[in-house]
Structures are given as C-alpha cells and as structure tokens.
Amino acid sequence: MDDDPSVRRSTCRLIGSLGHSAEAFGSAEEFLASGRLTTTACLILDVRMPGMDGLELRRLLADRRLAIPTVFITAHAGDEEERQAMRGAIAFLRKPVDKPTLVRVLESVLPRSATCGGKRDGH
C-alpha cells in the first residue's frame, strides 16, 4: 500500500513478472474490508498512509493473530518507526528501492502463485 499510484502500478507489475498475482487497495481500511485477510501471502506497506497508517494496520493484524508477512517500503520514516515496523515485518526498505532488493525479499517469502496485497488504484 502506497499513496503514489505509479509506485502501486510498478510494484504490481514487478510482482506479476515474478509469476505472482498482486492486488492493490486504496487504503488499509479497504484491504481490511476486502475479504482477503486469510488469503494474502504478503503485504507491502508504506509506513505513512492516509487514514490508518501501515504501523497501525500491522498492529491490528497482529492483534487478530493474522501472521501475514509484511514488507515496509517508505521514504518518510524515522528510526523509531523503523523499530516499530520491524517488530513484525520481514523487511524495512527505504525508497528508492532497487528492483533486485525487492525481488530478493519477495522471493524469500512468496510461494509460487501467491497473492501480495497492496493499494487498489483501478489497475
């Protein structure tokens, strides 16, 4: 989930090129209402998002005992936010993220044909 539509589209294309399906959502709240909580193989979240931020979503999922592997990708996060994110995330990447790094992280957690959730922007 990222507030930049071009980042969402390019991330979905990258995941698709790896043989996985990706679904994007407009907000954390939309993801929570999607019915995809138990079928999502991983989440790619920005720390700072409109509405519920990525850290809040990660805590909510943990409270619900939903262990979805999470990758944080952000341009605007301090050290404390990184520490909070890494309490349950598999990676914390700072923008701009190079493609090989993101590919390596995703391939370490995604089974073949898995769905990775993010923000929906109509694409």
Image: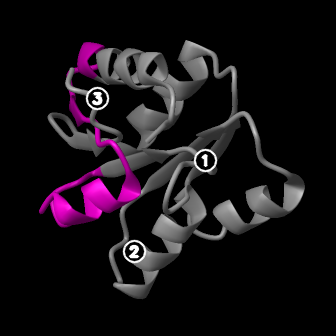
Question: SS for tag 2?
Answer: helix
* Labels 1 and 2 touching (C-beta < 8 A): no
Of mark 1 and mark 2, the one earlier in the sequence is: 2
Magenta range is 16-41
User: Does residue 62 appear in this view?
Assistant: yes
Residue 33, position as x, y percentages in the image: 19, 64
Residue 118, position as x, y percentages in the image: 35, 41
Distance from the alpha carbon under mark 1 to that under mark 3: 24 Å
Q: Nearer the viewer, residue 32 or 63?
A: 32
Quadrant containing the C terminus is top left
Residue at position x 27%, y 13% from top?
A: 17
The three-letter amino acid code for the residue at tag 2 is Leu
* Residue 84 among those drawn in magenta: no
Nearer mark to the viewer, of 1 and 3: 3
Q: Which residue is mark 1?
A: 91
Distance from the alpha carbon under mark 1 to that under mark 2: 17 Å
* Residue 26 among those drawn in magenta: yes
Please give the label number shown on residue 61. Answer: 2
The three-letter amino acid code for the residue at tag 1 is Ala
Q: Which residue is mark 3?
A: 121
Question: SS for tag 1?
Answer: strand
Q: Nearer the viewer, residue 12 or 18?
A: 12
Residue 100, position as x, y percentages in the image: 56, 16
The relative height of residue 31 versus residue 44 in the rendered view (above or below) is below
The relative height of residue 90 versus residue 105 in the rendered view (above or below) is below
Residue at position x 35%, y 50% from top?
A: 42
Residue at position x 72%, y 33% from top?
A: 75
The relative height of residue 52 versus residue 97 in the rendered view (above or below) is below
